[in-house]
Amino acid sequence: MFDQTLDLEHPFGHHRQMPRTSVRRRRITALLGASLLLGVLTGPVAHAFSGTGRTAVRHYVVRPGDTLWSIAHAARPAADPRIVIDQIQRTNALSGSSIVPGQPLAVPVA
């Protein structure tokens, strides 16, 4: 009755051991995946929060005959004026494209 021993580590006769290389591969894969995910997430997120949140602006007072297009072209002649106009509108909280002479504007320079 007590002459049979019960093997607690290998019940039901399963004596197969997992090769060490499989364990290493899984650990390395998990480590590489986690570091890749961390790199992807910290790159743009760190870049978004790295600055003070402010862009360099130049203050400009609208003159008679000025348009957002002419102001954007004068501020950054090499850039696409549509992008600069959008930045001017967002910076100054303008809802449209109408500006009046004497109105102060903050024009992003970079």
Image: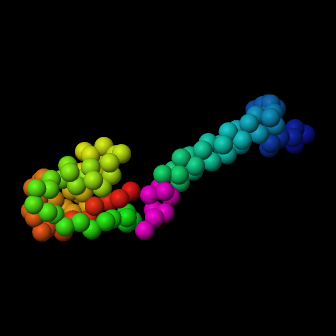
Residue 63 vs residue 2, the one in the foreground: 63
Quadrant of the rendered image containing residue 15: top right
Q: Is residue 48 left or right of residue 69?
A: right
Q: Is residue 25 magenta?
A: no
Quadrant of the rendered image containing residue 90: bottom left
Q: Residue at the spot x=60%, y=44% of the render?
A: 36
Quadrant of the rendered image containing residue 5: top right
Q: Is residue 8 left or right of residue 99?
A: right
- State the quadrant of the C terminus: bottom left
Residue 99 vs residue 45, the one in the foreground: 99
Residue 27 appears at what percent x and percent y? 71, 43
Residue 76 vs residue 45, the one in the foreground: 76
| Above or below 58: residue 83 | above
- State the quadrant of the N terminus: top right
How many marks the image carries: the answer is 0
Q: Is residue 47 magenta?
A: yes
| Above or below 15: residue 67 | below
Q: Residue at the spot x=30%, y=43% of the render?
A: 80
Residue 95 shows in this picture? no
Name the outermost residue toward the right.
Answer: 3
Residue 37 appears at what percent x and percent y? 56, 46
Q: Residue at the spot x=32%, y=60% of the render?
A: 108
| Above or below 2: residue 55 | below
Q: Is residue 34 left or right of residue 83?
A: right
| Above or below 21: residue 107 | below
Q: Main secondary structure of the magenta part?
A: helix
Residue 12 shows in this picture? yes
Per the rendered image, the range of residues in magenta is 45-52
Residue 41 appears at what percent x and percent y? 51, 50
Q: Residue at the spot x=23%, y=66% of the render?
A: 60
Residue 109 vs residue 50, the one in the foreground: 109
Q: How is the image coloured?
A: rainbow
